[in-house]
Each structure stands twice: as C-alpha cells, then as structure tokens.
Amino acid sequence: MFGHHSAAALKAGARPEAVEIIANMGNLDDLTPEEAVIVRYGRELMGGHRVSQESFDAALAQFGEANTVVLGALMGYYSFIACTLLSIDMAPPAGSPVLPKRP
C-alpha cells in the first residue's frame, strides 16, 4: 500500500521530505506544523491505540472538529484496508517502494 499511496501523495503535492520522514519514522521537527500535527496524531493512534489530549487539541485547532473526526476515520479506514491485504498475503508489485521493517 505504501508504494501506491506515497506515489499518489507526491503527485498530489506532498513534500518528498515529508514522505521520507513518515516512511522512516523520522523526526517531526523537520515537518511543517500542519504535517507534524497529522503525523503525530497518526503515530499515537496507530502505535498506541489512543491520541493524547495534546495531539487531539492540536488537530482540533488546525482542522476543526469535523475534519479531526475525518482524520481519525481515514486512518482507521487505511488500517482496515491494510489488515485486509495482509490477511490475504497481498504483496506489492515487484520493485514497488515498501516501508522499512520495524523493530
């Protein structure tokens, strides 16, 4: 999924540096403030299955109530699709970019 989504993100105007930081669990200090809010929210939600009040408040201030809910929903949907693909052993096409293995 990463290969397809990272290519689509770059085509839509995402900064290559941001995609690289996300892929490699890089430092959030090198992201724009808006990017950092999104990535921090996602790392907390996906990694710890909850979002801190600080991260929620930052997303709320940046995106408003409705879009903060949509942010979490999109991340949940992405996780749902990823689990579905993993469960059927769907592999990316040969040569596609993949995320580095996590420890």
Image (tube, rainbow, N blue to C red):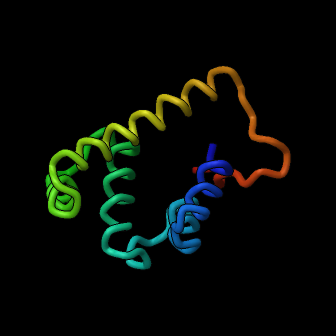
Quadrant for the N terminus, please.
top right
User: Does residue 77 appear left or right of residue 17 in this picture?
Assistant: left
Q: Residue shown at 23%/49% (left/top)?
A: 68
Q: Identify the image quadrant of residue 32.
A: bottom left
Left or right of residue 86: residue 61: left
**Residue 100 x/y as whole percent:** 65, 54
Which image quadrant is residue 87 in?
top right
Provide residue 11's location: percent of width, then percent of height.
61, 62
Q: Position of residue 34 (x, y in %)?
A: 32, 68
Residue shown at 66%/48% (left/top)?
A: 4
> Relative to 76, is 97 above or below?
below
Q: Residue furthest top?
A: 88
Nearest to the observer: residue 95 or residue 25 = 95
Question: How many numbered marks does the figure carry?
Answer: 0
Residue pictured at 35% horizontal, 58% vertical = 38
Against 76, residue 14 (above or below) is: below
Residue occupying the far right of the picture: 94
Which residue reaches farthest bottom? 30
Determine whether, in the image, residue 59 is placed left or right of residue 77: left
> Is residue 98 shown left or right of residue 39?
right
Identify which residue is drawn at 59% across, 50% down.
5
**Residue 95 place in picture, x, y as percent:** 83, 51
